[in-house]
Image (cartoon, grey):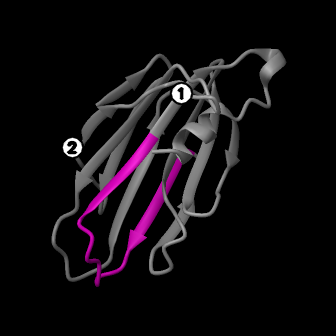
Amino acid sequence: MLVFPFGSIQLLVNGCPQKYIEEQLFTETKSFSVDSRIKISTELPPSSEAISVYCFLKGGQITGKNIQTDEGLAAISFDIKGYRITIGTTGDIWENKYFYLDDGINVIFPASLEKRKISFCIAEKKIKAEKIDDDSTWLAVDIW
């Protein structure tokens, strides 16, 4: 389980906890600098029905939320206990449905799903009051 000072990242597939593989990614480029950046991936089970994948932040009180999509990206950012965390995944896939919830992203894959693996990128950064508009975490989940 991916744990931060303010909570943990949980993954549910069809409402059941799902194990995932964590991969540490680089944290600095010319475009962004973040404290941590992790890709989590899991295999999806075979199913003759739609599959719901819910990646969310558990724990702590969220003080701000911002949906941040882009071409090919579905992302949501949260401010919590002086940190900004962004959860992102591949977006704009027409057959998938994306729901931005109070604590994460829910992606519904159709029964005809051919791709059996999903990945999310999570970026986290301690934010300073004077840098409240810092987009580093969003940029970090867009490039992976």
Q: Residue at x 44, y 42 (%)?
A: 121
Q: Quadrant of the C terminus?
A: top left
Q: Residue at x 47, y 16 (%)?
A: 5
Mark 2 or 1, closer to the camera:
1
Q: Which residue is mark 1?
A: 124
Q: Is residue 85 magenta?
A: no
Q: Which residue is mark 2?
A: 19
The vertical placement of 90 against 96, above or below, is above
Instruction: Report whether residue 101 is seen.
Output: no
x, y percent for residue 83: 62, 22
Q: Amino acid at mark 1?
A: Glu
Q: Which residues are magenta?
A: 103-121
User: Residue 7: which quarter of the image?
Assistant: top left
Q: Residue at x 36, y 66 (%)?
A: 52
Q: Is residue 117 magenta?
A: yes
x, y percent for residue 98: 52, 66
The vertical placement of 114 against 77, above or below, is below
Q: Amino acid at mark 2?
A: Lys
Instruction: Report whether residue 74 is seen.
Output: yes
Q: Residue at x 46, y 37 (%)?
A: 122
User: Residue 92: which quarter of the image?
Assistant: bottom right
x, y percent for residue 14: 29, 63
